Image (cartoon, rainbow, N blue to C red):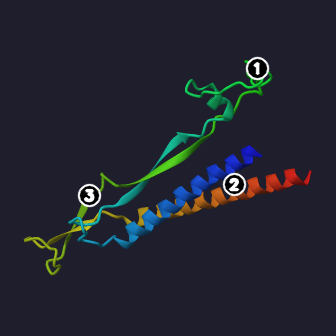
């Protein structure tokens, strides 16, 4: 039953990340024309960076760590050899970080009537391409959908196992 819960946890993290990507995309779209922010200057595009993180250690791996101190109360407990159950599947999950895109720059738009225009009549606008944001949003939506299907499938497998 633990592996089913593991798959729920992995998919839940995927849902969280895709939700954050959708939020950042919506924020980028909403601020595509923002020329002045609290920090000063035009809005800078944000991104969600995702990196792999190894999943929690299994119980056996936790027991093998040198900093784990256990008291042996019975000679039958942990007799000194590890029962091999086959190769364990290494699982990983994802962690995310929301960052301002360092590569984003600004577009210069000629609009001498704009209050933020410089002496030559150019206004610095955020470098946000609506098409790219829409593609990111569709990608996040599809990944979110795939994670919900994975959770539904794991739930069905658990229900089927309980019906046996």
**Residue 83 screen position, x and y as percent:** 77, 23
Q: Nearer the viewer, mark 1 or mark 2?
A: 1
The tag on residue 119 is none
Crowdedness of circle 2 by 10 Å Cα count: few (<14), some, many (20+)?
some
Q: Nearer the viewer, mark 3 or mark 2?
A: 2
Q: Secondary structure at mark 3?
A: loop
Q: Nearer the viewer, mark 1 or mark 3?
A: 1
Figure check: 132 above or below 109: above
Q: Quadrant of residue 43?
A: bottom left
The tag on residue 79 is 1
Instruction: Please tell me how many numbered marks the rendered image carries.
Output: 3
**Residue 130 screen position, x and y as percent:** 40, 67
Q: Nearer the viewer, residue 16 or 153?
A: 16
Figure check: 4 above or below 142: above
Crowdedness of circle 1 by 10 Å Cα count: few (<14), some, many (20+)?
few
The residues bearing labels 3 and 2 have C-alpha atoms spaced at a distance of: 38 Å
Q: Residue furthest right?
A: 164
Asked if disc 1 and disc 3 are in contact, CB closer than 8 Å, the reply is no
Crowdedness of circle 3 by 10 Å Cα count: few (<14), some, many (20+)?
some
Q: Is residue 119 left or right of residue 15?
A: left
Q: Secondary structure at mark 2?
A: helix
**Residue 56 screen position, x and y as percent:** 60, 39
The residues bearing labels 1 and 3 have C-alpha atoms spaced at a distance of: 63 Å
Q: Earlier in the sequence, mark 1 or mark 3?
A: 1
Label 2, on which residue?
150
Q: Nearer the viewer, residue 1 or 144?
A: 1
The residues bearing labels 1 and 2 have C-alpha atoms spaced at a distance of: 39 Å
Q: Residue furthest bottom?
A: 113
Label 3, on which residue?
105
């Amino acid at each position: 039953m633990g592996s089913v819960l593991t798959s729920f946890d992995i998919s839940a993290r995927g849902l969280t990340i895709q939700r954050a990507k959708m939020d950042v995309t919506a924020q980028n779209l909403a601020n595509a024309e923002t020329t002045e922010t609290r920090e000063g200057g035009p809005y800078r595009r944000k991104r969600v960076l995702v990196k792999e993180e190894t999943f929690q250690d299994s119980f056996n791996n936790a027991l093998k760590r040198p900093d784990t101190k256990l008291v042996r109360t019975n000679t039958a407990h942990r007799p000194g050899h590890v029962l091999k159950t086959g190769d364990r599947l290494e699982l990983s999950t994802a962690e995310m970080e929301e960052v301002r895109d360092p590569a984003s720059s600004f577009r210069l738009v000629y609009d001498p009537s704009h209050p933020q225009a410089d002496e030559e009549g150019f206004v610095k606008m955020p470098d946000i391409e609506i098409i790219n944001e829409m593609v990111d949003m569709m990608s996040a939506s599809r990944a979110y959908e795939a994670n919900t299907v994975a959770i539904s499938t794991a739930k069905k497998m658990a229900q089927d196992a309980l019906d046996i």
